[in-house]
Image: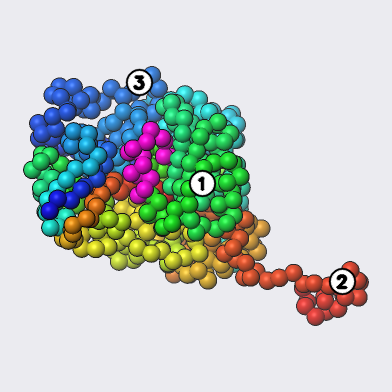
Amino acid sequence: MSTPVRIPTPLRKLTKNQEVVDAEGATIRDLINDLEKSYPGLKERICDEQDNIRRFVNVFVNNEDIRFLNDADTVVKAGDEISIVPAIAGG
Amino acid sequence: MKPRQPVSRKRDDQVPIPGSRNLEQRWRERDSSISRGSWWDKILSPTLFMDKHPFFSHLQCRECGRRYPKEVVHVCEFDFGPLEAAYNYEAINGTLTREKILSRPRSMWRYRELLPIENEPTVGLQVGFTPLIAAHRLAQKLGLKELYIKNDTVNYPTLSFKDRVVSVALSRAKELGIDTVACASTGNLANSVAANAASAGLRSFVLIPADLEPSKILGSLVFGTNVIGIQGLYDQVNRLCSELAGKLGWGFVNVNLRPYYAEGSKTIGFEIIEQLGWRLPHHTVVCMASGSLLTKIHKSYIEFSKLDLVDSSDFSIYGAQATGCSPISTAIKNNSEMVKPISKPQTIAKSLSIGTPADGYYAIRTMKETGGTAEDCTDQEIIEGIKLLAETEGIFAETAGGVTVACAKKLIENQRIPRDESVVLCITGHGLKTQEAITNKVGKPKLIHPNLKEFETLLEQELI
């Protein structure tokens, strides 16, 4: 199952300027690992050394922040849209 | 005397973290678009971005210390940390003196060496230098010896502190050649972007939650801006703006212009010091939405100390939130550095209704490092706070101001703020903007006919 993932501007150098890329996986963690295969270096930007999603990265499944779901273990279904968004904005 | 927060002083001088070269080397090898010997050499060169402007030198990641050019960029490409304006304090040290400040017009721009623009400001020249009121009557009510109100309810032109940040963001936007500006807003920022963009001749779009107070919506519409009401919460508006900022060539003041914008808040702190007679207050209470204002007031106190414009002394900074949206104060009370987002804020303090505060982490650190703390209050306490400030000092604050007063009251009662030291409350917006919150909570006019006897009867009955 392939899921579209929206890539934020600061990471597009790694995705050859593609705004949306496809990734495979049943959870957010799987998707990130799959993205790393296609676009080496991407995971390191999104996750810290302990494999946790970085403090200043927000990930959304459709319109829901994964921190309100099951964090990196949030299950992804067919038709879902994933967005990676810098957390530093607003206020 | 030494400041209470040696760690934060040190961070202001931060350079790329030790040992980060290995990581950089790996990234350099992996990222084919970063060619060896160019980009990284530039990033690591301490002087590259110190171009013709002698004071504002570059942007720098607050997390890893990497340097970035002064462009439309707001997060670090490597860890998504916020980019912060960095200055050449050595150059400023010999230039910005008390005498020079005192000789300049009474606006926030009298501290312009410490603001992130390259040329003379072009937007919001009259913004700032709002009154600092010695609040004797409120002090008496709260049992304090020395209390001041920093009264940004009368900031020019849109009656909130947001005019400070917007005048910096739009001055910088013009320097960068941007012709359309935008923002995600809980109301005050939208008003300020709309007004200042109108006077600067810039096209503007303001994106707000559709259910904001009618006064705040009207207060944007009147300036002829494009008001986009989003059927959702502020955090969703914010996310939309983050995605739009990556697509459009616009300047979103609190997204891709945020490093410039946020610095404008420092001027509240500079003014407090100057208006106190070049002295730091012992305790400063600030309301928190994203937490940015609180961290920037801290930065202002540190910068003036560093530049010897004020004698270094202990100070503490306290954050105030509404209980219905209190992710930062909850984290402080739980002694956690992790801010747990609030999915559905519920409070009359809509200007503070940010469930995922961008600067929450830094606000927590600032409060802890300065020996301050956070407090929160109910909607009822907010209304009482608004009334208390109005009835004692004649200042009509919006709901966020009620939050600051109510939380300060609690902090004093709980003995977190001592009664015999100087206290400043930052009141950030005017009550006319959130009238709906206190409708039916402040009584009604007493109706009589134009008749002497009726007035006398009323006096007897009501004992006005």
The residue lying furthest to the top in this view is B52
Residue B227's disc number: 1
Q: Secondary structure at mark 1?
A: strand
Observer-side mark, 1 or 2, equals 1
Q: How crowded is the residue under tag 1: few (<14 C-alpha within 10 Å), some, or many (20+)? A: many
Q: Is residue B125 visible?
A: yes
- Is the C-beta separation of discs 1 and 3 under 8 Å? no
Residue position for label 3: B51
Relative horizontal placement of residue A43, taking residue B269 as reference (left or right): left
Marks 1 and 3 belong to one chain: yes
* Pointer 3 chain: B
Left or right: B156 with respect to B169? right
| Residue at the spot 47% in from the left edge and 65% down from the top edge | B347
Q: Label 2 amino acid?
A: His
What residue is disc 2 on? B449
Tell me whether circle 3 and circle 2 mark residues in contact (CB < 8 Å).
no
Residue B249 in the magenta stretch? The answer is yes
Q: Main secondary structure of the magenta part?
A: helix
The disc numbered 2 marks a residue on which chain? B
